Image: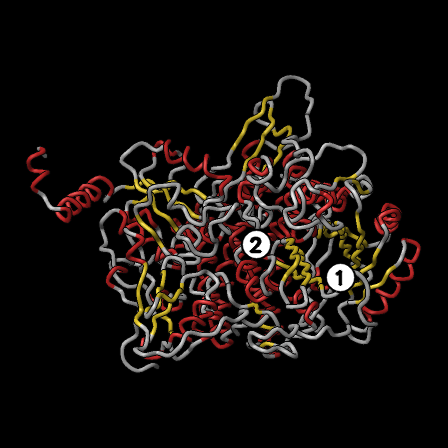
Amino acid sequence: MTDQRAASRSVPETAAELRRAVTRQFGRSLHIRTLDTGSCAACEQEIRLLAAPHYDLHRLGFFFTPAPRHADLLMVTGPMVRAFDIAARKTYEAMPGPKLVVATGACALGGVYQPDAFTHGGVGETLPVDVWIPGCPPSPLALLQGLLVAVGRLAEKVQDLSFIQNGTPR
Amino acid sequence: MTLWFLRGLRRGVVTTRYPARPDASAAALPTPPAFRPEALTRALADRLAAACPSRALARDGDALVFDVGACTACGRCLAEAPGAATSSGEFELAATLPAHLVKRIPLLAGGGAAAPATEGGSP
Amino acid sequence: MTAVRAGAAALPGLLSQLGRDAADDARPVITVAVPAASLEDAVRRLAAHPGARLADVFAAGGGPAAGRDAAAAGPVVLRLVWGLDADRGYLITESEIEGERYPALSDIAPAAFYEECEIYEQFGIRPGGGKPLNRVALPPQAATTPGQAPPRLGRAPVEPPGDVHALHHVGGHAFEFPFGPVRQVGVESLYYGLVTSGEEVVDLYLFTWHKHRGVEWRLQGRTPREALFQVERTEGLGAVGNAWAFAVAAEAALGLEPPAPAARARAVALELERLYNHAAATAALCQSTGLVIGQAAAEIALERLLRVNAAAFGHRYLFGVVDIGGAAAGPDAAVLRRDLPGAYGELCRAADALLATNSFLDRLEATGILTQEAARRLGLVGPVARASGVATDTRVDHPGPPYAGLPPAVAAATAGDVLARFRVMLAESAESVRLIGDLLDAGAGPGRAEPVGTEPGGSQPRGETREARGGPARAGMAARSGLGWAESSRGEALAWVALDDTGRITRARLRPASVRNWRGFDDACRSQNVFTDIPIIEASFWLTVAGTSR
């Protein structure tokens, strides 16, 4: 893409191009590294179940890898305990680009823990997050949806939800 | 090993078809609340914000600001105001921007005074 | 709960009173104020008492984050919680510590060493004897100058604790192998220091402070109900056990007694928690031995059990069930009766196949042996202790409602290896299913006891201080405090809570079972094991890092 063509594209067009590039790169094969920055262990249990028979993330072309060097996506749980900053950065920097970061669970998204002396209260300050998955813990189905959104195979849904009830209450 | 193999064959496939088909087990999952603006007075909005242990709710003027990302679906707001909040049933909540997770729920127009400062809920 | 002031000499009399109270089906907890000078003698007597087990040691007071200004801080009160399992009661000794030193406890009761280190980091008081203290709770960043350091529960120690571990001399060459805190995929962050001469594990020590979130500090100033949200999320895989222990402690302080159906609802949730944790441990055992097909079978059972939890109580991990004064959610008995047998049947089938697979059993037998002596000395609890012949189970030894009427059979073994722990877990699972049936038959549902004299938002004290059932009125140090316990899937979970006159927490002590049992992990790994045995042993312990690093 030449500079001239880049200059003539709008932001939404560039964003769409970027999404297509992400899908081309990761859509059929994605390797995931997890990172626990202080979770209660429930998120980890749901993440482990992604490889279990009921969910089987392998059928979608997703795999877990212990080596950051082989990883495309970093799945981060926990409120980012400050004592963990260095380990978190090292893990992220050990992953070669292009790479994605998915913040997983309410603790990582700013709930449960407020920022204070012990925790950042979320991972957004420390790592550049691409996708945020709410839940406490997010169920394996929610995790699958989040991963598929991250690689562009599913459209994001939540921005169009209003969380307003219409009509009479039940 | 034959033992394991035969048992597996007998049980059959348990794998979900999600995302190609919806998964019935999602119906039992706890989900963030959805609100009824016509029941949300300022006082109620303040009470809901105080009841939320994860600070997912706050009142900003005439709107209830709901941070879906901070919500743990604990249900305390539903218990506090059953007429104003019910389970949304939504579990596909992944967002590419934090702003997509922050919702403004309009309060009842002319919805009365704010709640007096309280000490908080029961023990 | 009775509170008395006594010296060490009065202990035998108190202990026999405990036995008498237990016969009344009260929840006997005796608090004894022991002057610091007689503390060592008291500990000696209690350690020698038959069936006595040091369950926890913690401190309170010393002023909030008073830094190094000792003059501004109040006295630190050191509490030892003893589980007197043979007498079916708990005894708490309270001692005011003036100055920096108190008698060395771990010389008499080795089960106290970890807690001595933690108390030093949080309160700045140390046991006599000069033994080096390790860093166990607060991360190294906490050792910087006052003003930058994270807040403590009391005052900072004069000298920071060392990052030491037992030096190990081996014949030949040994090297140290740091592993973690970022470990395999999908497991919690934990640092191992492995000392090895090649393949065998010469020594193993853990740094568990990476996940320290300051939960006990965070709970100060909250009401018990507000705090419960955080307590559940301290160790999510033990949410019911820890929340129940905390709720009992708060209820003891507030004088509340949950309605019987609510107590049964809590027990149903606790047994479901036990079931899914044992299924998860089975899956982890298969994964650690490389038996992928067994892992898949156990994971099918685990997933089905989690779905049963969601159907019965509205949450896969049973968050939001326990409430202060009762249970916030009741089991959907019809759905539970319909779905649990099938889910448990999956676990049974997987377990039967595993117990017939020799290649799997070979990896488990004689691996990670923990002797009965070690389990007792270290004060271990739960299936880990029971598999080593220490058959304590708070559902039987300290029965509160509803277990008083429905005592479970205690599963125990003597071999103390991974296979013994696996068998104990399977036996407990069978017992849990039976208990759930009995509890549902007796009627389980949500409900809450309300405290007397509460006004919404009012300034009246919350809850009356009530006398214990038939016991004397409270006197002594902790005016409104309470001890709570529950038999979580990992063992005895304890909690102790002190409330001020507005009903807010001044000190909350959370002691999930993981806190007790991680110290046995080193011993179990050291007994003639190789690297590849470590994940197997870890799966058989099935603890969490979050439960200890909180």
Q: Examine the rendering and report whether any part of residue A2 can be seen.
A: yes
Characterize the local packing of mark 2: few (<14), some (14-19) or many (20 or more) Cα atoms within 10 angstroms: some
- The residue under label 1 is C478
Q: Position of residue A46 (x, y in %)?
A: 43, 53
Image quarter (top left, top right, bottom left or bottom right) of the N terminus of chain C: bottom right
Characterize the local packing of mark 1: few (<14), some (14-19) or many (20 or more) Cα atoms within 10 angstroms: some
User: In terms of secondary structure, where does tag 2 sit?
Assistant: helix
- The residue under label 2 is C218
Q: Which residue is painted at 66% across and 53% down in the image?
A: C382
Q: Where is residue B104 in the image (x, y as percent from the top left)?
A: 30, 65
On the image, which quarter does residue B103 sit in? bottom left
Name the residue nearer the viewer: C377 or C422. Answer: C377
Q: Which chain hosts label 1?
A: C
Same-chain check, marks 2 and 1? yes
On the image, which quarter does residue C418 sit in? top right
Residue reaching furthest to the right: C9
Instruction: Name above or below for residue B33 compared with residue A29.
Output: below
Look at label 2 and name its amino acid: Arg
Instruction: Name above or below for residue C170 compared with residue A137.
Output: above
User: In terms of secondary structure, where does tag 1 sit?
Assistant: loop
Look at label 1 and name its amino acid: Ala
Q: Examine the rendering and report whether any part of residue C363 can be seen.
A: no
Q: In this view, does A68 lie to the left or right of C483?
A: left
Q: Name the N-terminal-most of marks 2 and 1.
A: 2
